[in-house]
Image (tube, grey):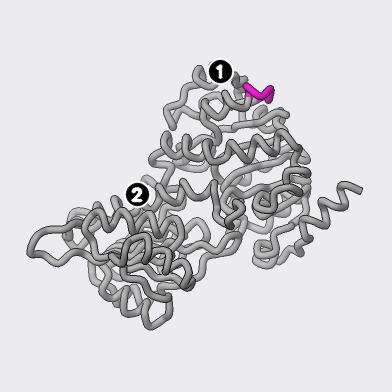
Amino acid sequence: MFIGVPRETHRLEHRVGLSPYAVARLTHYGHTVVVEKGAGLEAMFSDSEFEKAGAQIVYSSEEAYKRADIVCRVGLLSSDELDLLKRGLIICAFHHLAVATRRNVEHLMELKSTIIGYEIIQDRQGEHPILAPMSEMAGQMAVHLAARYLQNDMGGRGILLGNVPGVAPPTVLILGAGSVGCSAARQALASGAHVIVVDEDLTALRTVSREFSGQVVTAVAGMAQLERFTAIADVVIGAVLIPGAPAPILVTEDMVKAMKPGSVILDLSIDQGGCVATSRPTTLDDPTFIVHDVVHYCVPNMTANIARTASRALANAVLPTLKEVLRKGLRDALRDDPGLAAGVYLYEGQMVNEKVGATLGIPATPLQQLLDGSEA
């Protein structure tokens, strides 16, 4: 099969869908990989590195899409890119269709596309193995960014996100006890902050409590608790994920109004719509805005700013799944791996994800029904 790696077109997206190492592994097993010229340059991967790994360099996105059976990219497709797609293409990426437009999704359906979302693929333990490294990096970055935006010259409270003898430590409130939340908690604790983690899942909170040996305050995410904790927080990190669905609003505008002037919100759920009422998407070159005297950071693709590390981590996570799909064929791989099947939004042009279908008003058909039908 032919694997296509187009250059990302999203503004300030510096990552690339596969690394040269991943390309070398795929070509070693006899697969053909076509990489658009310059696709890896912003992640510091040269065209010559891809060629040495066995890739064929093509000179346009159109050629990368037209020659491919499977496309591996990072972010969601733009409206312009939809016009480059051939019928029946398999496209793997962080699609986030829960916040896509119905028009774009219907276009993909008309093209009989199969859309696999890295963010909702699961392993046998129900975890998200491809999303996990991005989440862990985002959690670490969030604490470093919080430290930066707490400084006076960035509009913050003039607080050091650290531990100074004789000075009370800052309070970091983390919404969500998943991969992002745990990574952020780990980094914040190492910085010397007082850390609070809230979640609706008691099992997740118990896991956090055990991992951090009771050093982190945990609480169930009720309205009263959130009002109390946001009012005392110097930093709020939104790390809420409902796979395949928009993030719920946990922090209301009234809660933001009651926060300390100069405090910082980092809404890492913004790629699923955000979990803070006052959030709106921002960009790496204009990452923050201030509402009610609170600094907001809401960049959906924040790990694009560590493009080389992120691209390597993504490719390493994608490679085992991709190899199985290439070895077995997509249909058999989906039948054998329920976790991979959970990552499918569209199968041959039909909506199979119930949550996204409900959000967009598009009826969903169970994937197993389609797989059984294609076998008949």
Q: Is residue 44 above or below residue 128?
A: above
Marker disc for residue 51: 1
Q: Is residue 197 above or below residue 299?
A: below
Q: Residue at position x 47%, y 39% from top?
A: 313
Marker disc for residue 141: 2
Q: Residue at position x 39%, y 46% from top?
A: 284
Query: Under tag 1, what secondary structure?
Result: helix
- N-terminal of the pair, mark 2 or mark 1, is 1
Going by the numbered disc 2, the residue's amino acid type is Met
Q: Is residue 213 magenta?
A: no
Judge from the rendering whether residue 266 lies leftward or rightward of residue 319; answer left or right.
Answer: left
Residue 249 visible here:
no
Q: Residue 286, image x and y in percent? A: 36, 49
Residue 81 visible here:
yes
Q: Residue at position x 44%, y 32% from top?
A: 43
Q: Residue 251, image x and y in percent? A: 41, 73
Q: Residue 274, image x and y in percent? A: 47, 63
Q: Is residue 87 above or below residue 140?
A: above
- Bounds of the magenta segment: 27-32
Q: Is residue 28 magenta?
A: yes
Foreground: 73 or 329?
329
The answer to which quarter of the image holds residue 83 is: top right
